[in-house]
Image (cartoon, rainbow, N blue to C red):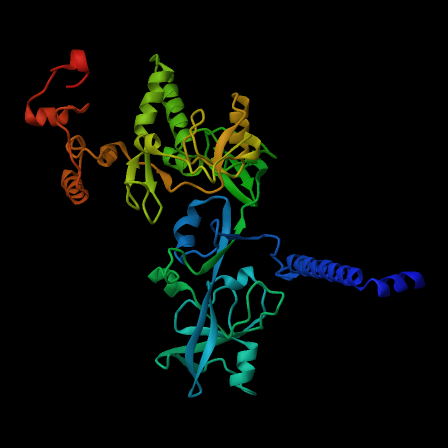
Amino acid sequence: MKSYFVFLKRNKLYTAIQAFGLSVALGFVILLASHVRTEFTVGTTQPMANELYIAGGENTVGMRAKTAPDIFPNVPQIKGWTRAGDNSSCEYSVEGEMVKLSAMEVDTNFFQFFDYKLVGLDRKKVLPANDEIIVSESFARKYFPGEDPIGKTIRQFGIHSKTIVGIVEDFDKDDIFKPVDILESVLPGEKAGWVRTGTTYGYVCNFITLAEGTKIEEVEEAPQGAMYVTIKGKKHYILPGHEVEVKEGQELEAGDQLAEGLVDPEDIIKYKGLGEGRKYLAERLGKILEDSGTPSDKRNLEVLARAAIRHVRVTNQDGMGDYLPDDVVDYNALQASYRPDEETTRLVRPKDAVGKYLQTPVLHYTIGTRITPKVAKFIQEHGHDKISVEDTAPSFTPEMIRLRTASHSNPDWMASMGTSYLTKQLNEAATEGDDTNVRQNADWRPRLAFGEGFGKQISTTGEF
Protein backbone atom coordinates (compact mmCIF):
# COMPACT_ATOMS: atom_id res chain seq x y z
CA MET A 1 0.00 0.00 0.00
CA LYS A 2 2.90 2.37 0.87
CA SER A 3 4.53 1.76 -2.50
CA TYR A 4 1.22 2.52 -4.26
CA PHE A 5 0.96 5.91 -2.59
CA VAL A 6 4.56 6.61 -3.55
CA PHE A 7 3.68 5.71 -7.14
CA LEU A 8 0.71 8.10 -7.10
CA LYS A 9 2.88 10.86 -5.66
CA ARG A 10 5.44 10.48 -8.42
CA ASN A 11 2.83 10.24 -11.24
CA LYS A 12 0.69 13.30 -10.59
CA LEU A 13 -1.05 13.34 -14.01
CA TYR A 14 -2.09 9.74 -13.63
CA THR A 15 -3.32 10.46 -10.11
CA ALA A 16 -5.35 13.46 -11.31
CA ILE A 17 -7.01 11.43 -14.07
CA GLN A 18 -7.90 8.64 -11.65
CA ALA A 19 -9.26 11.07 -9.09
CA PHE A 20 -11.41 12.80 -11.74
CA GLY A 21 -12.78 9.49 -12.99
CA LEU A 22 -13.57 8.40 -9.45
CA SER A 23 -15.40 11.66 -8.72
CA VAL A 24 -17.49 11.37 -11.93
CA ALA A 25 -18.41 7.79 -11.10
CA LEU A 26 -19.33 8.79 -7.56
CA GLY A 27 -21.46 11.61 -8.95
CA PHE A 28 -23.41 9.15 -11.14
CA VAL A 29 -23.90 6.88 -8.12
CA ILE A 30 -25.32 9.79 -6.13
CA LEU A 31 -27.66 10.77 -8.99
CA LEU A 32 -28.82 7.18 -9.40
CA ALA A 33 -29.41 6.85 -5.66
CA SER A 34 -31.40 10.10 -5.67
CA HIS A 35 -33.52 8.87 -8.59
CA VAL A 36 -34.18 5.53 -6.89
CA ARG A 37 -35.15 7.32 -3.69
CA THR A 38 -37.56 9.56 -5.61
CA GLU A 39 -39.15 6.60 -7.40
CA PHE A 40 -39.71 4.67 -4.18
CA THR A 41 -40.68 7.50 -1.82
CA VAL A 42 -42.57 10.29 -3.63
CA GLY A 43 -46.29 9.78 -3.13
CA THR A 44 -45.91 6.35 -1.52
CA THR A 45 -47.27 7.49 1.83
CA GLN A 46 -50.76 7.75 0.36
CA PRO A 47 -52.99 4.71 1.07
CA MET A 48 -54.16 4.62 -2.58
CA ALA A 49 -50.68 5.09 -4.07
CA ASN A 50 -50.74 1.71 -5.84
CA GLU A 51 -54.25 2.25 -7.22
CA LEU A 52 -53.93 5.72 -8.73
CA TYR A 53 -52.94 6.51 -12.31
CA ILE A 54 -52.49 9.85 -14.03
CA ALA A 55 -54.28 10.13 -17.38
CA GLY A 56 -52.40 12.08 -20.03
CA GLY A 57 -50.99 12.24 -23.51
CA GLU A 58 -47.59 11.46 -24.95
CA ASN A 59 -45.88 14.69 -23.91
CA THR A 60 -48.04 16.07 -21.12
CA VAL A 61 -50.47 15.07 -18.41
CA GLY A 62 -52.22 18.43 -18.55
CA MET A 63 -55.87 18.29 -19.63
CA ARG A 64 -58.85 20.60 -19.67
CA ALA A 65 -60.91 20.50 -16.50
CA LYS A 66 -63.90 19.41 -18.59
CA THR A 67 -62.16 16.35 -20.08
CA ALA A 68 -62.92 14.01 -17.18
CA PRO A 69 -66.70 14.60 -16.84
CA ASP A 70 -67.13 14.56 -20.63
CA ILE A 71 -65.19 11.38 -21.39
CA PHE A 72 -64.50 9.24 -18.33
CA PRO A 73 -68.14 8.22 -17.63
CA ASN A 74 -68.14 6.50 -21.04
CA VAL A 75 -65.01 4.47 -20.28
CA PRO A 76 -66.09 1.40 -18.29
CA GLN A 77 -62.48 0.62 -17.33
CA ILE A 78 -62.27 3.85 -15.30
CA LYS A 79 -63.75 3.31 -11.85
CA GLY A 80 -63.33 6.84 -10.50
CA TRP A 81 -61.36 10.04 -10.88
CA THR A 82 -60.42 13.30 -9.25
CA ARG A 83 -58.72 16.43 -10.57
CA ALA A 84 -55.97 18.72 -9.32
CA GLY A 85 -54.43 21.65 -11.15
CA ASP A 86 -51.64 24.12 -10.46
CA ASN A 87 -53.12 27.62 -10.50
CA SER A 88 -49.70 29.27 -9.97
CA SER A 89 -49.76 32.35 -7.72
CA CYS A 90 -52.51 34.92 -7.23
CA GLU A 91 -52.71 38.19 -5.34
CA TYR A 92 -54.91 38.15 -2.27
CA SER A 93 -55.76 40.72 0.37
CA VAL A 94 -55.22 39.04 3.76
CA GLU A 95 -56.05 41.09 6.81
CA GLY A 96 -55.62 44.27 4.74
CA GLU A 97 -52.23 43.21 3.32
CA MET A 98 -51.76 42.37 -0.40
CA VAL A 99 -49.72 39.16 -0.71
CA LYS A 100 -49.00 36.58 -3.42
CA LEU A 101 -50.29 33.11 -2.54
CA SER A 102 -49.57 29.83 -4.32
CA ALA A 103 -52.76 27.98 -5.16
CA MET A 104 -53.92 24.59 -6.40
CA GLU A 105 -57.36 23.80 -7.77
CA VAL A 106 -58.92 20.53 -6.59
CA ASP A 107 -62.06 18.53 -7.21
CA THR A 108 -64.89 18.12 -4.73
CA ASN A 109 -63.83 14.48 -4.09
CA PHE A 110 -60.09 15.22 -3.84
CA PHE A 111 -59.83 14.09 -0.20
CA GLN A 112 -61.46 10.75 -1.01
CA PHE A 113 -58.40 9.93 -3.14
CA PHE A 114 -55.68 11.63 -1.08
CA ASP A 115 -55.52 11.06 2.67
CA TYR A 116 -54.28 14.45 3.85
CA LYS A 117 -55.37 15.62 7.27
CA LEU A 118 -58.28 18.04 6.90
CA VAL A 119 -59.89 20.17 9.60
CA GLY A 120 -63.16 22.10 9.47
CA LEU A 121 -65.31 20.31 6.89
CA ASP A 122 -66.50 16.95 5.58
CA ARG A 123 -63.79 15.43 3.38
CA LYS A 124 -66.38 13.60 1.24
CA LYS A 125 -67.28 16.78 -0.66
CA VAL A 126 -65.20 19.94 -0.52
CA LEU A 127 -65.28 23.30 -2.28
CA PRO A 128 -68.57 22.96 -4.16
CA ALA A 129 -68.53 26.72 -4.79
CA ASN A 130 -65.97 29.23 -6.01
CA ASP A 131 -66.36 31.48 -2.95
CA GLU A 132 -64.74 28.96 -0.58
CA ILE A 133 -61.10 28.02 -0.04
CA ILE A 134 -59.01 25.68 2.11
CA VAL A 135 -55.75 27.01 3.57
CA SER A 136 -52.58 25.19 4.56
CA GLU A 137 -51.36 24.87 8.12
CA SER A 138 -48.35 27.09 7.38
CA PHE A 139 -50.65 29.77 5.90
CA ALA A 140 -52.83 29.69 9.03
CA ARG A 141 -49.82 30.01 11.33
CA LYS A 142 -48.32 32.88 9.30
CA TYR A 143 -51.37 35.06 8.73
CA PHE A 144 -53.60 34.10 11.67
CA PRO A 145 -51.20 33.26 14.51
CA GLY A 146 -53.01 32.02 17.60
CA GLU A 147 -56.39 32.33 15.83
CA ASP A 148 -58.84 30.01 14.12
CA PRO A 149 -58.89 31.13 10.44
CA ILE A 150 -62.04 29.14 9.57
CA GLY A 151 -64.85 31.53 8.76
CA LYS A 152 -62.56 34.44 7.97
CA THR A 153 -62.54 36.08 4.54
CA ILE A 154 -59.73 36.98 2.15
CA ARG A 155 -60.09 38.78 -1.16
CA GLN A 156 -58.66 37.65 -4.50
CA PHE A 157 -57.12 40.66 -6.29
CA GLY A 158 -58.69 42.66 -3.46
CA ILE A 159 -62.12 42.17 -5.05
CA HIS A 160 -63.52 38.63 -4.93
CA SER A 161 -64.30 37.52 -1.38
CA LYS A 162 -63.52 33.92 -0.44
CA THR A 163 -64.31 32.30 2.87
CA ILE A 164 -61.86 29.95 4.58
CA VAL A 165 -63.75 26.72 5.26
CA GLY A 166 -60.96 24.32 6.20
CA ILE A 167 -57.30 23.74 7.00
CA VAL A 168 -55.18 21.06 5.28
CA GLU A 169 -51.82 19.75 6.44
CA ASP A 170 -48.78 21.02 4.52
CA PHE A 171 -47.58 18.97 1.56
CA ASP A 172 -44.00 17.82 2.18
CA LYS A 173 -41.08 17.03 -0.10
CA ASP A 174 -42.16 13.41 -0.59
CA ASP A 175 -45.64 14.34 -1.84
CA ILE A 176 -46.51 14.47 -5.52
CA PHE A 177 -47.89 17.98 -5.01
CA LYS A 178 -45.65 20.91 -4.28
CA PRO A 179 -46.46 22.94 -1.15
CA VAL A 180 -49.18 25.56 -1.67
CA ASP A 181 -50.89 28.17 0.47
CA ILE A 182 -54.49 27.58 -0.55
CA LEU A 183 -56.76 25.06 -2.30
CA GLU A 184 -59.48 26.38 -4.61
CA SER A 185 -62.33 24.74 -6.53
CA VAL A 186 -61.65 23.33 -10.00
CA LEU A 187 -65.29 23.80 -11.04
CA PRO A 188 -64.92 27.36 -12.48
CA GLY A 189 -62.14 26.06 -14.75
CA GLU A 190 -64.40 23.20 -15.87
CA LYS A 191 -67.17 25.63 -16.75
CA ALA A 192 -64.88 28.04 -18.60
CA GLY A 193 -62.78 25.36 -20.34
CA TRP A 194 -59.52 27.08 -19.41
CA VAL A 195 -56.25 25.99 -21.04
CA ARG A 196 -52.66 27.06 -20.60
CA THR A 197 -51.75 30.24 -22.46
CA GLY A 198 -50.39 29.55 -25.94
CA THR A 199 -51.31 25.83 -25.87
CA THR A 200 -54.22 23.52 -26.65
CA TYR A 201 -53.91 21.47 -23.47
CA GLY A 202 -55.17 22.11 -19.98
CA TYR A 203 -53.63 22.67 -16.58
CA VAL A 204 -55.43 19.88 -14.71
CA CYS A 205 -54.06 16.44 -13.83
CA ASN A 206 -56.65 13.67 -13.83
CA PHE A 207 -56.03 10.96 -11.23
CA ILE A 208 -57.99 7.81 -12.00
CA THR A 209 -58.66 4.42 -10.47
CA LEU A 210 -59.29 1.46 -12.74
CA ALA A 211 -62.12 -1.04 -12.47
CA GLU A 212 -60.99 -4.45 -11.31
CA GLY A 213 -61.62 -7.62 -13.27
CA THR A 214 -65.24 -8.61 -12.67
CA LYS A 215 -66.34 -12.09 -11.69
CA ILE A 216 -69.73 -13.61 -11.01
CA GLU A 217 -69.71 -14.04 -7.24
CA GLU A 218 -72.97 -15.91 -6.82
CA VAL A 219 -75.98 -17.16 -8.77
CA GLU A 220 -78.94 -17.93 -6.50
CA GLU A 221 -82.70 -18.19 -6.48
CA ALA A 222 -84.56 -15.02 -5.52
CA PRO A 223 -87.21 -15.26 -2.78
CA GLN A 224 -89.79 -13.69 -5.10
CA GLY A 225 -88.94 -16.13 -7.87
CA ALA A 226 -86.44 -16.12 -10.76
CA MET A 227 -82.73 -15.53 -9.98
CA TYR A 228 -80.19 -13.16 -8.45
CA VAL A 229 -76.73 -12.72 -10.00
CA THR A 230 -74.27 -11.10 -7.57
CA ILE A 231 -71.42 -9.00 -8.99
CA LYS A 232 -69.10 -7.00 -6.70
CA GLY A 233 -71.52 -7.41 -3.83
CA LYS A 234 -74.50 -6.09 -5.80
CA LYS A 235 -77.43 -8.36 -6.60
CA HIS A 236 -78.84 -8.12 -10.14
CA TYR A 237 -82.38 -9.47 -10.51
CA ILE A 238 -83.09 -11.71 -13.50
CA LEU A 239 -86.75 -11.64 -14.51
CA PRO A 240 -88.79 -14.87 -14.56
CA GLY A 241 -88.65 -16.68 -17.89
CA HIS A 242 -85.11 -15.48 -18.68
CA GLU A 243 -82.48 -18.16 -18.31
CA VAL A 244 -79.23 -17.09 -16.66
CA GLU A 245 -76.33 -17.37 -19.12
CA VAL A 246 -73.44 -16.96 -16.65
CA LYS A 247 -72.11 -19.08 -13.80
CA GLU A 248 -70.29 -18.48 -10.56
CA GLY A 249 -66.62 -17.59 -10.97
CA GLN A 250 -67.03 -16.58 -14.62
CA GLU A 251 -65.00 -13.56 -15.77
CA LEU A 252 -67.07 -10.72 -17.23
CA GLU A 253 -66.24 -7.80 -19.48
CA ALA A 254 -68.17 -4.58 -20.00
CA GLY A 255 -71.24 -5.25 -22.14
CA ASP A 256 -71.49 -9.00 -21.45
CA GLN A 257 -75.03 -10.35 -21.24
CA LEU A 258 -76.14 -11.94 -17.95
CA ALA A 259 -79.34 -13.64 -19.11
CA GLU A 260 -81.20 -14.51 -22.27
CA GLY A 261 -83.35 -11.85 -23.90
CA LEU A 262 -82.99 -8.88 -26.21
CA VAL A 263 -80.25 -6.34 -25.60
CA ASP A 264 -80.34 -2.80 -26.94
CA PRO A 265 -77.67 -2.67 -29.69
CA GLU A 266 -76.79 0.82 -28.44
CA ASP A 267 -75.47 -0.74 -25.22
CA ILE A 268 -73.45 -3.27 -27.22
CA ILE A 269 -71.67 -0.67 -29.33
CA LYS A 270 -71.15 1.60 -26.32
CA TYR A 271 -69.10 -1.02 -24.49
CA LYS A 272 -67.86 -3.32 -27.27
CA GLY A 273 -67.74 -1.21 -30.45
CA LEU A 274 -69.51 -1.05 -33.81
CA GLY A 275 -68.35 -4.50 -34.91
CA GLU A 276 -69.87 -6.33 -31.97
CA GLY A 277 -73.07 -4.30 -32.36
CA ARG A 278 -73.33 -5.35 -36.01
CA LYS A 279 -72.61 -8.99 -35.15
CA TYR A 280 -75.28 -9.01 -32.44
CA LEU A 281 -77.91 -7.39 -34.69
CA ALA A 282 -77.24 -9.85 -37.55
CA GLU A 283 -77.47 -12.84 -35.19
CA ARG A 284 -80.71 -11.63 -33.57
CA LEU A 285 -82.35 -10.93 -36.93
CA GLY A 286 -81.33 -14.41 -38.10
CA LYS A 287 -82.83 -15.97 -34.96
CA ILE A 288 -86.09 -14.07 -35.39
CA LEU A 289 -86.40 -15.22 -39.01
CA GLU A 290 -85.49 -18.78 -38.06
CA ASP A 291 -88.13 -18.87 -35.31
CA SER A 292 -90.75 -17.64 -37.80
CA GLY A 293 -89.83 -20.34 -40.30
CA THR A 294 -88.36 -17.88 -42.81
CA PRO A 295 -85.04 -18.91 -44.41
CA SER A 296 -82.30 -16.27 -44.47
CA ASP A 297 -78.81 -15.82 -45.82
CA LYS A 298 -76.22 -14.78 -43.25
CA ARG A 299 -74.48 -12.55 -45.79
CA ASN A 300 -77.65 -10.57 -46.40
CA LEU A 301 -78.16 -10.08 -42.68
CA GLU A 302 -74.59 -8.86 -42.29
CA VAL A 303 -75.11 -6.32 -45.08
CA LEU A 304 -78.27 -5.09 -43.36
CA ALA A 305 -76.50 -4.83 -39.99
CA ARG A 306 -73.59 -2.90 -41.52
CA ALA A 307 -76.05 -0.46 -43.09
CA ALA A 308 -78.00 0.04 -39.85
CA ILE A 309 -75.03 0.43 -37.51
CA ARG A 310 -72.50 2.66 -39.25
CA HIS A 311 -72.13 5.96 -37.42
CA VAL A 312 -69.43 7.51 -35.27
CA ARG A 313 -69.15 10.87 -33.53
CA VAL A 314 -65.98 12.96 -33.84
CA THR A 315 -64.64 13.67 -30.34
CA ASN A 316 -61.40 15.50 -31.13
CA GLN A 317 -61.78 19.17 -30.16
CA ASP A 318 -59.77 20.12 -33.27
CA GLY A 319 -61.86 17.98 -35.60
CA MET A 320 -60.63 15.13 -37.73
CA GLY A 321 -59.71 15.61 -41.38
CA ASP A 322 -62.64 17.37 -43.04
CA TYR A 323 -64.93 16.62 -40.10
CA LEU A 324 -65.71 19.10 -37.34
CA PRO A 325 -65.90 18.34 -33.61
CA ASP A 326 -69.13 16.54 -32.64
CA ASP A 327 -69.95 15.66 -36.27
CA VAL A 328 -71.83 12.37 -36.70
CA VAL A 329 -70.36 10.73 -39.78
CA ASP A 330 -70.62 7.50 -41.72
CA TYR A 331 -68.05 5.01 -40.42
CA ASN A 332 -67.64 3.42 -43.85
CA ALA A 333 -66.63 6.77 -45.37
CA LEU A 334 -64.34 7.52 -42.45
CA GLN A 335 -62.67 4.10 -42.70
CA ALA A 336 -61.86 4.68 -46.37
CA SER A 337 -59.91 7.85 -45.53
CA TYR A 338 -58.51 6.82 -42.14
CA ARG A 339 -54.73 6.62 -41.91
CA PRO A 340 -53.12 5.30 -38.69
CA ASP A 341 -50.30 7.36 -37.20
CA GLU A 342 -47.12 5.58 -38.31
CA GLU A 343 -45.18 6.81 -35.28
CA THR A 344 -47.57 5.45 -32.66
CA THR A 345 -49.13 2.42 -34.41
CA ARG A 346 -47.56 -0.94 -33.67
CA LEU A 347 -47.98 -4.44 -35.09
CA VAL A 348 -48.26 -6.83 -32.14
CA ARG A 349 -49.65 -10.20 -31.18
CA PRO A 350 -53.29 -10.12 -30.05
CA LYS A 351 -52.42 -11.14 -26.48
CA ASP A 352 -49.96 -8.21 -26.28
CA ALA A 353 -52.61 -5.78 -27.54
CA VAL A 354 -54.95 -6.00 -24.54
CA GLY A 355 -55.92 -2.50 -23.42
CA LYS A 356 -54.96 -0.95 -26.77
CA TYR A 357 -57.13 0.14 -29.73
CA LEU A 358 -57.42 -1.32 -33.23
CA GLN A 359 -56.07 0.82 -36.05
CA THR A 360 -57.16 -1.42 -38.92
CA PRO A 361 -60.32 -3.58 -39.14
CA VAL A 362 -59.93 -7.24 -38.15
CA LEU A 363 -62.71 -9.78 -38.70
CA HIS A 364 -65.91 -7.96 -37.65
CA TYR A 365 -64.05 -5.58 -35.32
CA THR A 366 -63.87 -1.97 -36.47
CA ILE A 367 -61.22 0.74 -36.10
CA GLY A 368 -61.10 2.03 -32.55
CA THR A 369 -62.28 -1.20 -30.90
CA ARG A 370 -60.63 -1.64 -27.51
CA ILE A 371 -58.84 -4.98 -27.27
CA THR A 372 -60.00 -6.97 -24.24
CA PRO A 373 -58.79 -10.45 -23.27
CA LYS A 374 -61.85 -12.02 -24.93
CA VAL A 375 -61.35 -9.99 -28.13
CA ALA A 376 -57.66 -10.91 -28.25
CA LYS A 377 -58.46 -14.60 -27.81
CA PHE A 378 -61.15 -14.53 -30.53
CA ILE A 379 -58.82 -12.81 -33.03
CA GLN A 380 -56.00 -15.27 -32.26
CA GLU A 381 -58.28 -18.29 -32.67
CA HIS A 382 -59.36 -17.06 -36.09
CA GLY A 383 -55.87 -16.99 -37.54
CA HIS A 384 -54.62 -13.44 -37.00
CA ASP A 385 -51.14 -13.52 -35.47
CA LYS A 386 -50.49 -9.76 -35.64
CA ILE A 387 -52.80 -6.73 -35.45
CA SER A 388 -52.21 -2.98 -35.74
CA VAL A 389 -52.95 -1.14 -32.51
CA GLU A 390 -52.31 2.14 -30.72
CA ASP A 391 -52.21 2.97 -27.02
CA THR A 392 -54.80 5.75 -27.24
CA ALA A 393 -58.37 5.73 -28.51
CA PRO A 394 -59.04 7.31 -31.92
CA SER A 395 -60.68 10.70 -32.33
CA PHE A 396 -64.19 9.27 -32.62
CA THR A 397 -66.60 7.04 -30.69
CA PRO A 398 -69.33 4.72 -32.01
CA GLU A 399 -72.80 6.22 -32.11
CA MET A 400 -76.16 4.47 -32.40
CA ILE A 401 -78.54 6.39 -34.66
CA ARG A 402 -82.13 5.23 -35.06
CA LEU A 403 -83.03 4.24 -38.61
CA ARG A 404 -85.56 7.06 -38.98
CA THR A 405 -82.75 9.65 -38.80
CA ALA A 406 -79.81 7.53 -40.01
CA SER A 407 -79.71 9.24 -43.41
CA HIS A 408 -79.17 12.65 -41.78
CA SER A 409 -75.43 12.01 -41.70
CA ASN A 410 -75.34 11.76 -45.51
CA PRO A 411 -73.38 14.77 -46.87
CA ASP A 412 -75.64 14.64 -49.97
CA TRP A 413 -78.48 16.82 -48.71
CA MET A 414 -81.04 15.73 -51.32
CA ALA A 415 -80.30 12.04 -50.87
CA SER A 416 -81.04 12.44 -47.16
CA MET A 417 -84.52 13.85 -47.64
CA GLY A 418 -86.46 10.58 -47.60
CA THR A 419 -87.00 10.63 -43.84
CA SER A 420 -88.57 12.61 -41.00
CA TYR A 421 -87.64 15.98 -39.49
CA LEU A 422 -87.03 17.57 -42.89
CA THR A 423 -87.01 21.16 -41.59
CA LYS A 424 -84.25 20.36 -39.12
CA GLN A 425 -82.35 18.40 -41.76
CA LEU A 426 -82.56 21.23 -44.32
CA ASN A 427 -81.37 23.79 -41.77
CA GLU A 428 -78.38 21.64 -40.82
CA ALA A 429 -77.53 20.93 -44.46
CA ALA A 430 -77.63 24.64 -45.31
CA THR A 431 -75.50 25.51 -42.29
CA GLU A 432 -72.85 22.93 -43.21
CA GLY A 433 -72.94 23.74 -46.93
CA ASP A 434 -73.92 20.24 -48.10
CA ASP A 435 -74.19 19.58 -51.84
CA THR A 436 -75.82 17.02 -54.14
CA ASN A 437 -75.00 15.34 -57.45
CA VAL A 438 -77.99 14.74 -59.66
CA ARG A 439 -76.42 13.00 -62.66
CA GLN A 440 -74.06 10.61 -60.87
CA ASN A 441 -75.86 9.50 -57.76
CA ALA A 442 -76.61 6.01 -56.52
CA ASP A 443 -79.65 7.40 -54.68
CA TRP A 444 -82.90 7.81 -56.61
CA ARG A 445 -84.16 10.97 -54.87
CA PRO A 446 -82.09 13.61 -56.71
CA ARG A 447 -82.96 12.14 -60.10
CA LEU A 448 -86.64 11.90 -59.20
CA ALA A 449 -86.65 15.53 -58.03
CA PHE A 450 -85.30 16.71 -61.39
CA GLY A 451 -87.05 14.04 -63.46
CA GLU A 452 -84.05 13.20 -65.63
CA GLY A 453 -81.17 10.80 -66.10
CA PHE A 454 -83.00 7.53 -65.45
CA GLY A 455 -81.20 4.56 -67.05
CA LYS A 456 -78.95 6.60 -69.34
CA GLN A 457 -75.46 5.17 -69.89
CA ILE A 458 -75.87 2.68 -67.08
CA SER A 459 -75.27 -0.31 -69.33
CA THR A 460 -71.84 0.96 -70.41
CA THR A 461 -70.61 3.26 -67.65
CA GLY A 462 -72.55 2.30 -64.57
CA GLU A 463 -73.62 5.95 -64.24
CA PHE A 464 -77.25 7.02 -64.07
The part of the image, by quadrant, that contains residue 158 is bottom left
In the rendered view of the protein, which quadrant contains the C terminus? Answer: top left
Q: Is residue 353 left or right of residue 442?
A: right
In this view, which residue lies farthest toward the front?
10
Judge by depth and name the residue closer to the eye, 354 or 334. 334
Query: Is residue 348 visible from the viewing direction of this image?
Result: yes
Q: Position of residue 42 (x, y in %)?
A: 63, 61
Nearer to me, 21 or 151: 21
Q: Nearer the viewer, residue 239 or 317?
A: 317
Measured along the vertical axis of the image, is residue 292 above or below residue 116?
A: above
The percent coordinates of residue 327 (x first, y second) are 28, 42
Q: Residue 246: in sight, yes or no?
A: no
Residue lying at the far left in this picture: please name it.
451
The image quarter containing residue 362 is top left
Horizontal placement of 238 versus 141: left or right? left
User: How many numbered marks have been drawn onto this rendered protein structure?
Assistant: 0
Question: Horizontally, is 412 left or right of 26 in the view?
Answer: left
Looking at the image, residue 156 lies above or below residue 321 = below
Q: Residue at x 33, y 21 (%)?
A: 303
Q: Residue at x 34, y 20 (%)?
A: 301
Q: Up-down: is 251 above or below 106?
A: above
- Report the quarter where the N terminus lies: bottom right
> Which image quarter: residue 112?
bottom right
Choose between 314 and 112: the one closer to the eye: 314
Residue 359 location in percent, x, y? 44, 34
